[in-house]
């Protein structure tokens, strides 16, 4: 604090000190409650992600507002790195393409945002990861529902009681707090723990997934029907020079 004479005050204003203490106490309570109750769902989520990546699948992450930022944060660490160098892990945040986001909002409605992108990008062995602090965001729920209809595995990150997400997820990690800010605070330790867990299997997974993704799909070989091509074709890549 700066006093009236322009010098730094030697102690914090009592109101600011109380504010800081309250913020950190809320954070501690949320994280400790999550740590006590998240074990089984954490292990289930980790198993789903490992199986997907070993089979050549990718992770599709999505959410709104701060949860959109969390989706992008997690995807960036998976694709680039977290603590150390390793092969890249296939992960896409469905919140980063401004043209797709605005086109869907304008033409189909905001609630269809993730549902539509999963319909376009989702393939067998992929995992849809929905993030919603309330567990009630309609576009996140519709995205998870679309993923289930396409037989993708689904993982959720939610807060409070989980809202409607448990019924749509194969595994859901719930931060048991009613405070949105504290739910967001606790997401990162959980996502970082998923990346840190079982370091050896994850490092082996990425190399296998990279090789698998590089192979041409059988359905694209000569003689495949046009229907089979549409059903089984992998993502289309365009190189612009």
Image: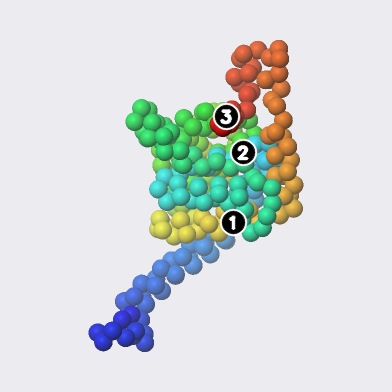
Is residue 178 found left or right of 126 in the rendered image? left
Q: Earlier in the sequence, mark 2 or mark 1?
A: 2
Q: Earlier in the sequence, mark 1 or mark 3?
A: 1
Answer few, some or many: residues within 10 Å of disc 1's Cα (few below 14, many 20 plus, some between 14 and 19): some
Q: Nearer the viewer, residue 157 or 105?
A: 105
Q: Nearer the viewer, residue 161 or 90?
A: 90
* Residue 172 visible somewhere in the drawing: no
For image coordinates 50% across by 36% down, the residue present is 144
Compared to residue 20, the image places residue 102 above or below, namely: above
Q: Closer to us: mark 1 or mark 3?
A: 3
Q: Which residue is mark 3?
A: 238
Q: Position of residue 134 (x, y in %)?
A: 42, 48
For image coordinates 53% across by 57% down, the residue present is 188
Q: What is the C-alpha distance between the residues marked 2 and 1?
A: 18 Å
Q: Which residue is mark 2?
A: 58
Q: What is the C-alpha distance between the residues marked 2 and 3?
A: 19 Å
Count the marks: how many? 3
Question: In the current view of this chain or complex, which residue is farthest to the front?
Answer: 241
Query: Do the residues under discs 2 and 3 have CB atoms within 8 angstroms?
Result: no
Q: What is the C-alpha distance between the residues marked 1 and 3?
A: 32 Å
Q: Nearer the viewer, residue 116 or 140?
A: 116
Question: In the current view of this chain or complex, which residue is farthest to the left?
Answer: 4
Answer few, some or many: residues within 10 Å of disc 3's Cα (few below 14, many 20 plus, some between 14 and 19): few
Q: Quadrant of the C terminus?
A: top right
For image coordinates 37% across by 77% down, the residue present is 17
Q: Position of residue 12 (x, y in %)?
A: 35, 81
Q: Which residue is mark 1?
A: 192
Q: Position of residue 39 (x, y in %)?
A: 62, 55
Answer few, some or many: residues within 10 Å of disc 2's Cα (few below 14, many 20 plus, some between 14 and 19): many
């Amino acid at each position: 604090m700066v006093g009236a004479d322009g010098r730094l005050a030697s102690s914090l204003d009592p109101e600011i000190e109380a504010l800081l203490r309250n913020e950190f106490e809320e954070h501690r309570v949320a994280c400790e409650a999550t740590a006590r109750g998240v074990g089984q769902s954490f292990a289930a989520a980790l198993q789903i992600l490992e199986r997907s990546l070993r089979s050549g699948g990718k992770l599709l992450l999505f959410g709104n507002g701060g949860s959109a930022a969390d989706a992008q944060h997690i995807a960036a660490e998976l694709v680039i790195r977290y603590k150390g160098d390793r092969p890249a892990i296939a992960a896409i945040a469905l919140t980063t393409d401004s043209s797709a986001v605005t086109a869907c909002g304008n033409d189909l409605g905001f609630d269809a945002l993730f549902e539509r992108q999963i319909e376009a990008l989702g393939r067998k062995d992929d995992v849809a990861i929905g993030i919603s602090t309330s567990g009630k965001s309609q576009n996140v729920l519709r995205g998870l529902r679309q993923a289930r209809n396409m037989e993708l595995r689904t993982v959720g990150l939610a807060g409070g009681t989980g809202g409607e997400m448990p019924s749509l997820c194969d595994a859901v990690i719930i931060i048991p707090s009613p405070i949105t800010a504290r739910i967001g605070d606790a997401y990162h330790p959980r996502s970082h723990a998923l990346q840190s867990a079982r370091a050896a299997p994850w490092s082996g997974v990425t190399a296998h997934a990279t090789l698998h993704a590089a192979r041409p799909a059988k359905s694209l070989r000569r003689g495949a029907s046009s229907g089979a091509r549409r059903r089984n074709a992998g993502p289309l890549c365009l190189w612009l020079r």
